[in-house]
Amino acid sequence: EGAETFKRVAYQAVMNEREVLMRQNDDLMGEIARLNGVIHSRDADVRQMANAIAGLEETVETLRQCVGGARMHAKSNAEASQVVRAAAQKEYATLRKEAERLARAAQDNDAKGVTLRLPSDGSDAGG
């Protein structure tokens, strides 16, 4: 009968241990599920961040292109104004030469005693 009691006590101890292990197993499974959820949510966060970064990179690229375009416009504007300036300087030089030529002609005429009478206003023109 002592052996029978020992068997019962041993069996009960094993069953108790089994119960504890089952509970611990359930707890661990719950913890694993929770961690999987955390990982899943972190993955989603990372994906969102990656999308946000990709969006920012696109924006930066667009801005870079805009800046490039603006630079090209500025350059072509500068080139255009340079062309205009060069033309204006050339025109000015031509006019200045012409003015100097006329001034020399006027001095020559003065030296020869020829006076050009230009009307000061339209009143005595042709008279």
Image: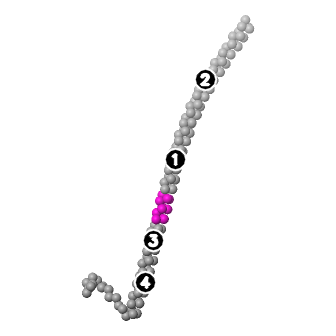
As shown in the figure, which amino acid type bears the numbered disc 2?
A: Asp
Residue 58's mark? 1
As shown in the figure, which amino acid type bears the numbered disc 3?
A: Ala
Span shown in magenta: 70-80
Residue 28's mark? none
As shown in the figure, which amino acid type bears the numbered disc 1?
A: Glu
- Label 4 with label 3: CB-CB less than 8 Å: no
Circle 2 residues within 10 Å: few <14, some 14–19, many ≥20: few
Please tell me which residue is depicted at 39% across the width and 90% down the height of the picture: 109
Rendered location of residue 87, percent (x, y): 45, 71
- The prevailing secondary structure element of the residues shown in magenta is helix
Please tell me which residue is depicted at 47% across the width and 59% down the height of the picture: 73
Please tell me which residue is depicted at 47% across the width and 68% down the height of the picture: 83
Q: Does residue 97 belong to the magenta stretch?
A: no
Mark 4–mark 3 Cα distance, whole angstroms, equals 21 Å
- Label 2 with label 3: CB-CB less than 8 Å: no
Helix or strand or loop: what does disc 2 sit on?
A: helix
Which one is in front in this view, the residue at disc 3 or the one at disc 1?
3
- Label 2 with label 1: CB-CB less than 8 Å: no
Instruction: Name which of mark 2 and mark 1 comes first in the sequence.
Output: 2
Residue that badge 4 annotates: 101
Residue 87's mark? 3
